[in-house]
Image (cartoon, rainbow, N blue to C red):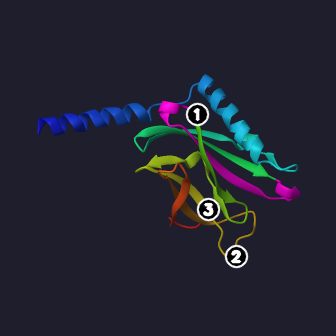
Amino acid sequence: MNFVKYLLLLSICFCSFTQAAELNKKEMSALSQKADVIIKAMLDKQATEYKAARVYKHLTNIRFSDFDVVMFTIEGFTGGNNSQFYMALFGPSSERFRFIDVIEVGAHGWRYVDFNSVISSNNNIEIDTREYQGTDSHCCPSKNGKVRFVLTDQDRLIEVEKINVGENR
C-alpha cells in the first residue's frame, strides 16, 4: 500500500511540475522560426498568414510527454476572401521543436476556433469552438462547441470528437 501511495504522490508531483512549464523567450523564438518554415510552405501566391493571431501553447501529458502547439490563421488562398485556422504540433520534449504534424481545425463558414482555449486533457488536445447553424451569417457562428484531437501512433493529428456544449451565443 505504501508503494501505491508513493507512486500516486510521485505522479502528482510530476504532473504539477509539467503543468507549470512555459515557453521562455529563447524557446518562443526557436518555435516561431520552425513555425515560419511550415507556414511558408503552405502558402500560395496570394495567401498570407495573419501573424498577429498566432498563438503558442505548451501542452503536457500527451502520450506521457510535453508538446508545443502553434495555432495560426492563413487568409486569401487563391486570392479569395477566406481564412482557415490551423494547429501545428511540435515535440515531444525529448526532441524539442521537432515538427510532427499540422491540421486544419476550422475556417470561416465551417467553425470558429478559440486559439487561447487549447488544452491537453486525457491524452487529447481540446479546443473551444463556435459552430455555424442554418441561420447564422458568415461572420458569426453561434453554437458553442468543443473539438478533440488525438495524436496517433503514426504521429498524425486526427479529429476524434466534436462536442456541443452550453447555450448558443
Distance from disc 2 to disc 3, alpha carbons, whole Å, reads 14 Å
Q: Residues within 10 Å of mark 3 (few under 14, many from 20)?
A: many
Determine the residue located farthest toward the front in the rendered image.
154
Q: Which residue is mark 3?
A: 130
Which residue lies most toward the left here?
1
State the image coordinates of residue 143 (x, y, percent, origin top left): 60, 67
> Can residue 147 be seen by looking at this rendering?
no
Q: Identity of the amino acid at label 1? A: Phe
Residue 9 image point, x, y percent: 24, 34
Q: Which mark is residue 135?
A: 2
Q: Residues within 10 Å of mark 1 (few under 14, many from 20)?
A: many
Which residue is the extreme one toward the bottom?
A: 134
As helix, strand or loop, the secondary structure at mark 1 comes to loop
The amino acid type of the residue labelled 2 equals: Thr
Instruction: Kindly tell me whether residue 137 is visible in this rendering.
Output: yes
Q: Which mark is residue 97?
A: 1
> Residue at the spot x=66%, y=58% of the render?
106
Residue 126 included in the magenta stretch of the image: no
Which label is found at residue 53? none
Please give the range of residues in magenta: 76-97
Please name the residue shown 72% across and 37% down the image.
37
